[in-house]
Image (cartoon, grey):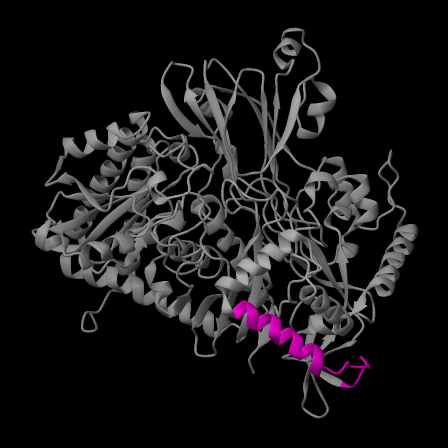
């Protein structure tokens, strides 16, 4: 390729044409598919891959799965498919094995070789979610799934089309293993058709531009992307940036704490290393991921959040290395279920990456790239007999939109975000009702469900449904978040509220409909408006029978907040009150704003007094870091922590040696550290590390961290500035009341205050007793 000169105008025209062709092929799959998640939510992506399997160019769509095309091709090469199985023009191969590629078995990959005049030029591929795959429970994502054999049909790159002819034996085998064969049959044919269209269009492209130009241009896409990625990485501030996220499900019989600590290391040479130094082990449940799926999530995240101006392909990963321990929840072996990887565990990795990357962006001056973490996809699944008398199952499409994380300069999007799919839609209610025996009663925003902050996180959505025209229906739900929140806020902002699931059995709902009486439209109204037996569920709840008139309510996730809530503009809070997105309680207790409850007029003088009172309380109640750490160490050593936390510590230390080192490192610091007096000294400003901490250089050339508000000294620039703050353990239900806040026996909001001015500079959503996280470790 080095000796082949690409005309820049012709090259750009070629790129645009090829991009449009992949989008057209993607649309073919969407239009033929019968699964709402494909037709309505756009869960499909089409790509062209080089002969070695690296993605050369991809369409929009569900990008988390696109890396599975690469790993599937690489598997076929490693297993010598061309020698013994054969790879010929017109062949297509289907894969659902997550150890080969993909996220969970519902997401089926289809790859096809691309030949031009008998010369092999690469591969085309796509993938979609298939509603019914013959798993233990309908829908394929249920807490009952604990082993790999529970996850449904197993297709390890099986040849389903041979030399242009669909193999009826394979199609019949697939149809015979599922409850309702329509989805797997039609959606498989849709993927085949999408690849066929891609091959036709690419053939036309080679006809027009020539084979030599095609080969060199598709290689050049990767060179361009790698060059762009290294340029971006070199512009970022070197250091190690960390976060922790938690969830609360182990197995069908055990609710329990699990975690992943994610560290992103940026080098001055333009490389990125992503590690999980502390992580929980895989579990005998469905909340695990195979490593290829996590690689897909990381590729998707970097494309959307960091390399969005690059040519989207696999080459952007060339300067990125990934280190995840085998046997962990993100690199499970082939024995356990990985059904919940797609919507929760893997998605939580996506949530986790948003925190350190935003810190990197802020410290590098790229404020427009700063965004607090968003939430997970959580949903309910329905199985049984549908309104047409057929056996089958499906899932609610309400799940695909969440509240977006707060931005550096504005609030997060309300129930309008799915960070893994840039071309994302939610289905019309009519689509859900036509494919499943349900009636949608309501969809609504949930007030105060986004994280509080100077800029608040986007609110979550809540939906209520009942079964209709089904003689037998079963329902389950999939997700995390009864006891903990699954993400973090950013720079002193709070994380989103917990997810919620509830069912009300044996209600008088249908009678009230006939009598045209008041109906509930929110989970908070159910017990007050109708009669029945109410049950609050864990978001991961096994299948249970429901009938007409039983009400099922699902609350999705909001986004994290950003910045000290006491800095929020009162006019924005008034606007949220008018739109039903916040409450007077939050306005007064969290934001410190005094508002007339009838006119919504702000008393600015009393508001400032209220905020000063709250800052004063922080300074009074906050504990100096050394004292706080010693108290925490004593509780750990005396096992004076809540039982869920003790169990979590035992399990994590048994699997992860680096967790033991973190505990010991904190203890060494407590023995060695000397408190700073926090006095102000003359200095030269270097850069802003966070909105509340800046790095300066004093007259002796020493780099320090100081408060951006009052210039209180937070120690050396490479120190953990949080260890120079006042610290306070907040009961989350004081911030998010009732079921919206985490259970303090599982998680507290550890607040960090500047000792000089009382600004809330950071918040950790963490189990009590966890070591204080060093979020930003600068490398000079």
Magenta stretch secondary structure, dominant: helix
Residue 687, image x, y percentages? 64, 76
Magenta span has 678?
A: yes
Tell me if I can see residue 561 in this picture: yes
Name above or below for residue 23 compared with residue 705.
above
Q: Which residues are magenta?
A: 658-682
Residue 632, image x, y percentages? 72, 66
In front of the other: 670 or 723: 670
Outermost residue toward the bottom in this view: 700
Outermost residue toward the top in this view: 515
Quarter of the image for the C terminus: give it.
bottom right
Residue at the image position 83 percent from the left and 51 percent from the top: 592
In front of the other: 9 or 528: 528
Magenta span has 307?
A: no
Residue 86, image x, y percentages? 10, 49
Quarter of the image for the N terminus: give it.
bottom left
Tell me if I can see residue 364 in this picture: no
Residue at the image position 47 percent from the left and 13 percent from the top: 469
In front of the other: 382 or 644: 644
Name above or below for residue 137 compared with residue 228.
above
Name above or below for residue 364 compared with residue 642.
below
Q: Can you tell which quarter of the image residue 759 is in?
A: bottom right
Name above or below for residue 518 compared with residue 739.
above
Q: Can you tell which quarter of the image residue 255 is in?
A: top right
Q: Can you tell which quarter of the image residue 673 is in?
A: bottom right
Residue at the image position 64 percent from the left and 71 percent from the top: 689
């Amino acid at each position: 390729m080095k000796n082949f000169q690409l005309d820049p105008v012709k090259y750009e025209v070629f790129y645009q044409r090829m991009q449009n062709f992949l989008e057209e092929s993607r649309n073919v799959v969407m239009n033929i598919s019968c699964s709402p998640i494909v037709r309505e939510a756009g869960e499909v992506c089409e790509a062209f891959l080089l002969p070695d399997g690296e993605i050369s160019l991809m369409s929009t769509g569900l990008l988390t799965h696109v890396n599975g095309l690469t790993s599937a091709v690489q598997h076929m090469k490693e297993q010598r498919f061309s020698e013994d199985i054969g790879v010929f023009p017109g062949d297509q191969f289907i894969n659902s094995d997550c150890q080969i590629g993909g996220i969970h078995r519902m997401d089926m990959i289809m790859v096809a070789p691309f030949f031009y005049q008998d010369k092999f030029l690469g591969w085309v591929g796509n993938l979609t979610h298939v509603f019914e795959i013959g798993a233990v429970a309908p829908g394929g994502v249920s807490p009952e799934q604990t082993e790999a054999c529970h996850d449904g049909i197993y297709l390890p790159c099986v040849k389903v089309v041979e030399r242009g002819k669909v193999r009826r034996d394979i199609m019949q085998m697939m149809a015979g293993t599922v409850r309702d064969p329509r989805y797997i049959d039609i959606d498989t044919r849709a993927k085949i058709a999408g690849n066929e269209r891609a091959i036709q269009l690419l053939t036309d492209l080679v006809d027009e531009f020539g084979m030599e130009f095609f080969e060199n241009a598709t290689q050049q896409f990767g060179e361009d992307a790698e060059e762009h990625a290294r340029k971006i990485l070199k512009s970022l501030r070197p250091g190690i940036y960390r976060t922790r996220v938690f969830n609360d499900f182990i197995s069908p019989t055990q609710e329990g704490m699990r975690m992943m600590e994610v560290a992103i290391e940026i080098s001055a040479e333009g490389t990125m290393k992503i590690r999980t130094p502390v992580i929980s082990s895989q579990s005998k449940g469905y909340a695990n991921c195979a490593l290829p799926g996590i690689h897909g999530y990381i590729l998707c995240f970097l494309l959307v959040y960091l390399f969005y101006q690059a040519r989207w392909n696999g080459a952007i990963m060339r300067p990125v290395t990934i280190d995840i321990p085998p046997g962990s929840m993100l690199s499970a072996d082939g024995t356990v279920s990985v059904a919940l990887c797609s919507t929760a565990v893997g998605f939580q990795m996506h949530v986790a990456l948003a925190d350190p990357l935003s810190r990197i962006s802020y410290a590098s001056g790229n404020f427009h790239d700063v965004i607090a973490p968003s939430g997970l996809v959580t949903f309910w699944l329905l199985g049984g007999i549908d309104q047409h008398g057929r056996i089958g199952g499906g899932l609610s499409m309400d799940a695909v939109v969440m509240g977006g994380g707060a931005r550096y300069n504005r609030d997060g999007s309300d129930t309008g975000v799915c960070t893994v799919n840039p071309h994302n839609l939610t289905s019309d209610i009519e689509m859900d009702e036509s494919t499943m025996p349900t009636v949608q009663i309501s969809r609504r925003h949930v007030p105060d469900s986004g994280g509080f902050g100077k800029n608040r996180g986007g609110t979550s959505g809540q939906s209520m449904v009942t079964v209709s025209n089904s003689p037998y229906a079963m329902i389950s739900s999939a997700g995390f978040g009864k006891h903990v929140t699954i993400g973090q806020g950013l720079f002193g902002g709070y994380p989103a509220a917990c997810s919620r699931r509830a069912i009300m059995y044996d209600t008088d709902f249908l009678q009230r409909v006939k009598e045209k009486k008041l109906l509930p439209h929110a989970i908070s109204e159910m017990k007050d408006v109708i009669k029945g037996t109410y049950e609050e569920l864990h978001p991961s709840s096994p299948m249970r029978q429901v009938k007409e008139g039983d009400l099922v309510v699902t609350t999705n996730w909001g986004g994290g907040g950003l910045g000290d809530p006491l800095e929020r503009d009162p006019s924005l809070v008034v606007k949220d009150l008018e739109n039903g997105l916040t409450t007077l309680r939050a306005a007064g207790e969290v934001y410190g704003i005094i508002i007339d409850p009838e006119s919504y007029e702000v008393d600015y003088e009393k508001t400032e007094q209220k905020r000063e009172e709250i800052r004063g309380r922080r300074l009074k109640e906050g504990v100096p870091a050394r004292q706080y750490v010693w108290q925490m160490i004593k509780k750990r050593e005396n096992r004076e922590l809540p039982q869920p936390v003790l169990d979590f510590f035992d399990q994590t230390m048994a699997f992860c040696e680096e967790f033991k080192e973190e505990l010991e490192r904190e203890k060494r610091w407590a023995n060695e550290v000397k408190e700073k007096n926090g006095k102000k000294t003359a200095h030269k400003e270097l850069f802003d590390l966070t909105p509340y901490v800046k790095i300066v250089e004093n007259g002796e050339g020493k780099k320090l961290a100081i408060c951006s508000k009052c210039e209180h000294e937070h120690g050396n620039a490479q120190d953990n500035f949080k260890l120079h703050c006042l610290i306070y353990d907040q009961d989350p239900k004081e911030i998010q009341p009732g079921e919206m806040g985490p259970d303090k026996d599982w998680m507290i909001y550890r607040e960090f205050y500047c000792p000089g001015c009382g600004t809330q500079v950071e918040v950790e959503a963490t189990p009590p007793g966890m070591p204080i996280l060093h979020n930003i470790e600068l490398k000079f």
